Image: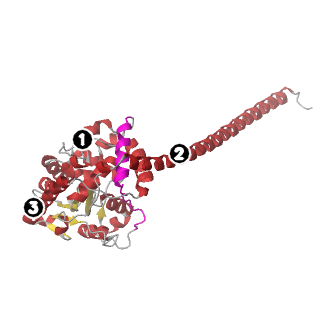
Amino acid sequence: MARRVFVHPGLPKTGTTYLQSLLWANRAALAEQDLLYPGRSPRQHMWASMVVREHPGVANRQPAVASSWSQLLAQLGDWAGTGLVSHEFFGAATAAQASAALAAIEAGGEVEVHLVVTARDVLTVATSYWQEYVKHGFAGADLDEFPPPTDPWDEWGWPAIDLEGVLRRWAPGLPPERVHVLVVPGSDAPREALLHEFAAILGVDATGFTTTRARENGSLGVVEVELLRRIGRELDGFTAAIDRGVWIRSYLSQGKLVPRRGERFLPSGERVAELRASAERAVAHVRDAGFTVHGDLERLLVPEELPELRHPASVTDAELLDAAVGTIAGLMTDVRRFRRENTELRKQEAARVAAAAREVAAARDGGLRGRLGDAVRRLRPPRP
């Protein structure tokens, strides 16, 4: 079994996608430094979080989902160095589920388990997470109502982003020096600062790692997010995760609306005050517990002075119409291109089938002629 295992349960919107994509791209380099990032893909860690959280959707997915957690554990069990489990949906687990997950890791022998929680101020996290919620085609919760208190299997609920709650559920039983709170560097820090700080906690030197495959999530503006939220209400047939991920999030949101680079937005003043109080409680808990802090803990507090930003409820119909017209124009261009590409592919396929049919006919005809020739030769009288 791995001697040390680092569990990274989020938080969401703290650079997790960026970290996971880069760590996966550098798995070979990590292994050379004795660190295993197990699984067939980062998605297996997401599936494993569903198993740990006893998500009812596991039963409706492919068999690989149900076995994902046990497979990660098996790979860690075959590794003698350091291991990493990372996905932001783990954070929503209940205390009992978190305890069971850590116990499963420790069951392989004497394992030194560490918890690494990446964090930023909860106002930024909540606002960004609502935006991600809308990007996936969901429209049920307004910004000021999000995220709702929900069951642990709902990764879009408050338990997933509540720093204090995640620490209270995941950290009990671990020495405080093995509970790491990594404050995400500010926008003025070098782009790769988060990668290097996270890697240092794992005991890895990320110098020389490839960073060309980094995935980052672009931001929607206030008009664009409201437009997408209203579109989401009408997309009744887009219920499958792949439909939401491929068509709503990747194609429409990231491909068409994010590039518009709209205005930033914030919740109402009342909601900001609630989140500010939550941040203060979380920071106090981290200090009182004596956890290992990487970065400036004060940066997790919500500033008293905030920029004057709009609320999505302020978006006018005229603004929505303008954004919709530009978006529809882009969609029409894509539909035309897709149609032309499909027409060309059909022509190529028809030509391929016709060529194959001619080859079969020629082979059949050639074979028939050959058999007739053999029969004629057999019927000829032998030469004297």
Of residues 169 and 221, the one drawn nearer to the viewer in this rendering: 221
Q: Which residue is mark 2?
A: 332
Callout 1 amino acid: His
Q: Is residue 259 above or below residue 191?
A: above
Circles 1, 3 touching at the beta carbon (< 8 Å): no
Q: Earlier in the sequence, mark 3 or mark 2?
A: 3
Residue 216 among those drawn in magenta: yes
Q: Which residue is mark 1?
A: 55
Q: Is 178 placed left or right of 216 in the picture?
A: left
What's the distance in space between the residues labelled 3 and 2, CA to CA? 52 Å
User: Circle 3: is it few (<14), some (14-19), or many (20+) Cα within 10 Å?
Assistant: some
Identity of the residue drawn at 68% across and 38% down: 356
**Which element type, helix, strand or loop, lies under badge 1?**
loop
Q: Is 146 placed left or right of 382 in the picture?
A: left
Q: Quadrant of the N terminus?
A: bottom left
Callout 3 amino acid: His
Residue 10 visible in this rendered orientation of the protein: no
Q: Earlier in the sequence, mark 2 or mark 1?
A: 1
Residue range highlighted in magenta: 210-236
**Which element type, helix, strand or loop, lies under badge 2?**
helix
Percent from the top left, x then y, of residue 241? 36, 42
Percent from the top left, x then y, of residue 318? 40, 48
What's the distance in space between the residues labelled 2 and 1, CA to CA? 39 Å
Identity of the residue drawn at 7% across and 64% down: 288
**Which element type, helix, strand or loop, lies under badge 3?**
helix
Callout 2 amino acid: Met
Q: Which residue is mark 3?
A: 285
The label on residue 282 is none
| Nearest-to-viewer mark from 3 and 2 | 2
